[in-house]
Amino acid sequence: MSRISVITGGAGGMGVATARIVGRDHTVVLCDVRKDRLDGAVAALTDVGITPTAVHCDVTDSDAVAALFDTASSLGPIASVIHTAGVSPSMGDAEYVMRTNALGTLNVDEAFYRTAGEGAAIVNVASMAAHMLPEELIPTGQFPRALTDQKAFLADMLSACDIAPEEARSGLAYALSKSFVRWYSTSQAERFNARGLRILSVSPGSTDTEMGRLEEQAGAGAMVADFAVPRWGTAEEMAELLAFCASDRAAYLTGTDILNDGGVVASMRERARVAAEKG
């Protein structure tokens, strides 16, 4: 029986690029909230000899996520989940961003925890934004509430966004939501390991995808030309890392976040250090 790899956000540039790699030796279940784009992704993969099973799924809907995993499990044992589904600050208000990125991750990962068998891995997509906020702005103490009371957690996170002007709250919600993804992917490693599962996250920098380009004139996208590697990352570069992290070759890798940002965060920190010395 074929091993199954589930890719959420499967109609996006990073999702399709990852499917092209893992689809070489896994049966791919491709999920996305955008039905028309999902059909296009399936057609593109079919053209290169990969025939994915498509599931129209909104990751913020826990029942829909449960149905996604039921479908995947019916095809064979789940070997990996690569959770690329998410939204950027330009795509909605703070609540929409937080619900999609933070609660969507929680729904997918908890379904994976309940469903997958020993040896399986889940790789979440965080962001370099999770490495850029000052620690004092991240309400880490409230993050565990997501596991017991999603409504209270969401209220806490939106309250944390209120320190920003209204026009900046979706950007702050994005950074906080990805900080949650990073926290969850590390804090839950011991719990997942007790069931023989791996969990980790990858934090991409500015990536040349449709969603990434929405931030080209603002936020992280505006930084690219001025830092260590003065270009955007490609979907294929991110996909190679995601596929490796989900594979058996990375069997010792869990409970961590891998920053893949072309050195932007490293440059920022070094420049801040030098400026402080001069100041």
Image (spheres, helix red, strand yellow):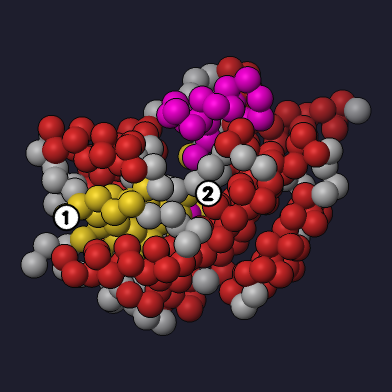
Under mark 1, the amino acid is Thr
Residue at mark 2 to residue at mark 1: CA–CA distance: 25 Å
The picture places residue 197, in percent across and down from the top left corner, at 36, 72
| Among the 4 quarters of the image, the one containing residue 144 | bottom right
121 with respect to 258 (left or right): left
Q: Quadrant of the N terminus?
A: bottom left
**Farthest-out residue, front:** 36
**Farthest-out residue, bottom:** 194
User: How many neighbours does mark 2 have within 10 angstroms: few (below 14), some (14-19), or many (20 or more)?
Assistant: many
| Nearest to the observer: residue 206 or residue 57 | 57
| Nearest to the observer: residue 154 or residue 206 | 154
Q: Which residues are magenta?
A: 201-221
| Among the 4 quarters of the image, the one containing residue 200 | bottom left
Q: Which mark is residue 126?
A: 2
Q: Is residue 148 above or below residue 59?
A: below
Q: Which residue is mark 1?
A: 27
214 with respect to 149 (left or right): left
Q: Is residue 112 visible?
A: no
Q: Is residue 216 magenta?
A: yes
Q: Quadrant of the C terminus?
A: top right
Q: Is residue 61 above or below residue 119?
A: above
Picture residue at 58% right of the left edge, 36% below the top: 91
Under mark 2, the amino acid is Ala
Disc number lying in front (2 or 1): 1
| Among the 4 quarters of the image, the one containing residue 183 | bottom right
Is disc 1 placed on a helix, strand or loop?
strand
Q: Earlier in the sequence, mark 2 or mark 1?
A: 1
Q: Is residue 12 visible?
A: yes
**Farthest-out residue, right:** 279
The picture places residue 233, in percent across and down from the top left corner, at 45, 28
